[in-house]
Amino acid sequence: SDHSYDYDVLVIGAGPGGYVAAIRAAQLGLNTACAESRETLGGTCLNVGCIPSKAMLHASELFEEAEGGHMATWGLKTTVELDLEAMQAEKRKAVGELTGGIEFLFKKNKVDWKKGHATFQDAHTVKVGDETITAKDIVIATGSSVTPLPGVEVDNAKGKIVDSTGALEFGEVPEHLVVIGGGVIGLELGSVWRRLGAKVTVVEFLDQLLPGMDKDIRKEAGKIFKKQGMQLKLKSKVTGATVKGKKVTVTVEPAAGGDAETIEASHVLVSIGRRPNVDGLGLDAIGLELNSRDQIETDHDFRTTVDGVWAIGDVIPGPMLAHKAEDEGIAVAENIAGETGIVNHAVIPGVVYTMPEFADVGMTEDEAKEAGHTVKVGKFPMMANSRAKANRDTDGFVKVIADAETDRVLGVHIVASLAGTMIAEAAVAMEFGATSEDIAYTCHAHPTHAEALKEAAMAVQGKPIHM
Ligand code: FAD
Ligand code: NAI
């Protein structure tokens, strides 16, 4: 190591991007520190994102299965009582175990945790609290925060108008939750509270939910969430929200403009997207400029335009996903160590963890056509999958998109109870450059939901057996 610096590598931020980069760098023999301003490691994902939301999704799913009659269908009759405090406590336990786990991994790998907010002094010097730290290479992994909506002031402590952090911590089931934004957070957390008994209204600017996903998935999402009892107000925008006592009055206008109406809510969730954390980082001091979306641009190796400064995760362009940040964390550490770290951004799965789940990898049908492909599409409904039928969870379908000439798989889109697990197979297949024929002729265990992917691939080929 270079003795003119305190560390070989300093990582700023200990989310899935930063903590993984720090551990990998240490594993590669680099003397590594990681600065984090939170009290615990793990970033957004472990503290207030992926993990607590999945814990609440799981718990509320159990509640709905018992309370909503799914268990009774199987002859399991019970009366259910909700102890929200106990549910929240169990969630916090899961979060604590996981963030504590990262602390253990830091110790095991000899990564020094520097507690406090980091600010650049120059390209090799960072101030963390009172401490000045120098490093040969510095990785920015500061993540993202909720995008504010003018006129709708988030106050998580008051707990009436909240972002996702506040919506994970409600101390009571909202009477009427208005969700602003029908994207991933809105649908996941909207589902949690709907299952636990809230009336939920989703106000979405566009004409359909889940922008960015395949058109068939988006259409299905609208049907499914409506069937589950969510009120959907599409092509609408919220222009203001005011708290008065226990009530929140929400003003909604047509997206295209027109007469405003008001909705009386008990709680409001702002989930209109997230933006990079770059404030107070001192980027001016190193002359690092942001793009028009306030993101830090990097090259293929995650180098910024400033020598010795690298960036990964939600703070750079691309999907704001934990596994994307993690893979970039490994790659950047390997590149700093002089190895070859690569992330294939064309094959990054995305999953919405509702019931059913919505998952995709690769291109949507429209993207494939725009990219100049002639496409062949194969679809298979979960209704015709024997395991889904046996389990009584037949919502959804699998859609495989292949190039008509080469048969190479360009994208896979799944709506199914286990879509998030099923999409991993599609990602592996695409990473190996599979054709739809490859998937169709791979033996899949019976009876599994995964067989629906094989049958959708057979549908690309011509005909599936079970349809
Ligand atoms: P972050 O996890 O945001 O971590 C950055 C860290 O840097 C933070 O802890 C922050 O405190 C710290 N920091 C920032 N600035 C400084 C500074 N100057 N000095 C010191 N420390 C600093 N993704 C999925 O893939 N799956 C999911 O199921 C999923 N669920 C989500 C649910 C919710 C409610 C939310 C909000 C997000 C979810 N995400 C999910 C997205 C996921 O959390 C992010 O993509 C991921 O955390 C990004 O990792 P990161 O390391 O880039 O940044
Ligand atoms: P999002 O981008 O998924 O959805 C935001 C939605 O709000 C869009 O549908 C958009 O059209 C709509 N919108 C924007 N402005 C609006 C307005 N003024 N009025 C009404 N609607 C408006 O963003 P979201 O849900 O906040 O999530 C942020 C990020 O967190 C996502 O990029 C996602 O990658 C990540 N995340 C991932 C999860 C997962 O992987 N399961 C779970 C939760 C979050």
Image: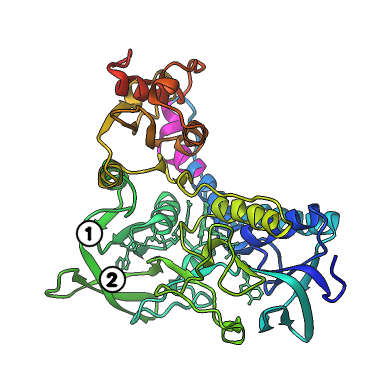
Mark earlier in primary sequence (2, 1): 1
Relative to 373, 108 lies left or right: right
Viewer-closest of 66 and 165: 165
Q: CA distance from mark 2 to mark 1?
A: 18 Å
Residue under circle 1?
Answer: 234
Q: Residue at x 56, y 49 (%)?
A: 343
Q: Residue at x 48, y 73 (%)?
A: 159
Scheme of colours in the image: rainbow
Residue under circle 2?
Answer: 264
Say if 140 sits above or below 87 in the image: below
Magenta residues, start to end: 62-73
> At label 2, which amino acid type do we have?
Glu
Judged from the image, the quadrant occupied by ligand 1 is: bottom right
Q: Tell which residue pokes out farthest to the left in this image.
A: 258
Q: Position of residue 218 (x, y in %)?
A: 29, 46
Q: Position of residue 153 (x, y in %)?
A: 41, 80
Q: Is residue 359 visible?
A: no
Q: Tell which residue pokes out farthest to the right in this image.
A: 3
On the image, which quarter does residue 38 sit in? bottom right
Q: Is residue 383 visible?
A: yes
Q: Residue at x 49, y 37 (%)?
A: 427
